[in-house]
Image: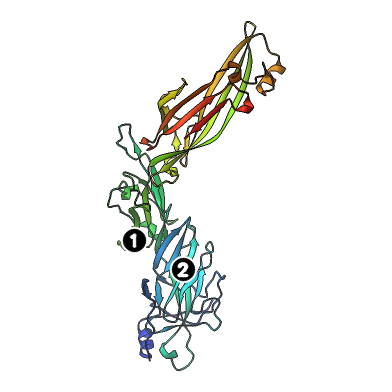
Amino acid sequence: MKAKRTWLGLALAVLAALAVGGLVAPPGGADEQQLEEVKDGEVSNQGEQAKDIDYDDEEPVSPESVTPVGETVTIVSKMMTPPGDMAFKDFPSPNPWQFVDIETDPDAPPGSADTDTASAIQISVEGVPETAGDCPLKGEGNLKPPGGGGGGPQEWHWSAKISEFVIFNPNPVKTGYALKDDGTLDPKKIKQTVTATFRPKSLAADAKIVVDDPNGRIEPIAEGDLTRNAGAGTIMFDVYGKTMTPVNQPNGDATIKATKADNTPLKGEAKVIVVIPSTQVHAKVGCVLVNKAVNLPNDKFELSTRAFGYIDIQVKDQFGNPLDAVYNGNKVVVEEFVNRQGDEFGWPGKGPIEEPDPALANGLKHDVASDRCVTESPGQLSPEQILAWENFELLLGGKDNCFALNGQQLESSAGQKIWVWGHELSNIVTRTITEKPVNREDVPFDVEDE
């Protein structure tokens, strides 16, 4: 590695005295930061795919923005201008940038130069993961005094690291809240755990979490709610909802930020969206018949057919999206059948949906409607006959199931009203169950939701 020197103060004054003309003003619209340090020696442009720069002497530059992109972030530097009255010097063989060489973290893709001129440079990288090191984006280049300078050979360079920012995960932060039976808030039942990852890591030791929540969407976050890991550069905390985010604010109207210990704001923030269960959409999965046969005492046998109609219920939030996983849980979806019509059917009373399983996962609740038809007859069945019945291969009077044997037709409907974590969904879905005295291939049991 080459030797390096940092030229400050007096050196810059000397260089400024050489000025014979001003620099072109940098493009507007971006935050600016003038570089302060002039360093001895020149650097080379190592190309877009290189993951290294020549020196390890960067001065810190705050980012202009740190924007979430899926599980990663895009980091954009401030618009960097040369020290004093100097200019950025172009590389003899640009590859691919004319005035800057860029290094990104080994876990991140190559960076790019959004502005690449003699008077201003702005660099960025998209797709930086949380695992990135303290300085996931660096840049360096060469410098020349105004008018190219004079005297003997002069080799100066600049070097910058984009540092001091925070990444929130997840981002945006989706959280929610539960309601009691009387419709009032059941506090701190629904939460979203957030990890704030700081770069450099040392900031996590005393950084502050700041919430901008003018409409009171979430519970306050106090110092005692924070779990700090200075070694990893993280702060973890839970976000609890109190009131729903309005439909006309799909990106949220509350924001989580961070500052340094001295209250200096850090780049990087997360919007908070408080979602609630709002509507239900049903999809028919299919119907299954199960035949059973058993010999009874007193020279009798019992035949039965159990019918299952499977339905998937997708719970959606107030924005029409599948309900977030913060509402996952068991026995948290409650149903009640109302407005019953048609033939008598054994509709269940109000209670949690526990079949075929009790879980709500990512807004999806599996449901099943079932009925059992049974008949008894004199005599005993051989093992071969029992197996044949259970395989729908034993025909009694040409019929292969008990719905066909009993010869009854039934149609019944009712509205399925649903609550999720105490939130009553705004729409009611009508479920119609039909039983017909036909063989399995003609579908003796069917469930339709609409």
Q: Of 288 and 383, which appears nearest the observer?
A: 288
Determine the secondary structure under disc 1: loop
Label 1 CA crowd tier, 10 Å (few <14, some 14–19, many 20+): some
The type of residue carrying mark 1 is Lys
Residue found at x 39% / y 57%:
204
Q: Is residue 382 left or right of residue 230?
A: right
Tell me where residue 436 appears, x and y as whole percent: 56, 23
Q: Of 173 and 244, which appears nearest the observer?
A: 244
Tell me where residue 18 appears, x and y as whole percent: 38, 91
> Can I make out residue 356 in this image?
no
Tell me where residue 415 appears, x and y as whole percent: 42, 30
Residue furthest right as drawn? 384
Residue found at x 48% / y 33%:
449
Reading the image, the residue beneath label 2 is: 124
Q: Nearer the viewer, mark 2 or mark 1?
A: 2
Tell me where residue 21 appears, x and y as whole percent: 37, 90
The alpha-carbon separation of the residues under discs 2 and 1 comes to 23 Å
Reading the image, the residue beneath label 1 is: 260
**Closer to the N terminus: mark 2 or mark 1?**
2
What mark, if any, has residue 187 been given in the picture?
none
The type of residue carrying mark 2 is Ser
151 shown above or below 72: below
279 shown above or below 387: below
> Which of the 4 image quadrants contains residue 8?
bottom left
404 shown above or below 235: above
Q: Are marks 2 and 1 in contact (CB under 8 Å)?
A: no
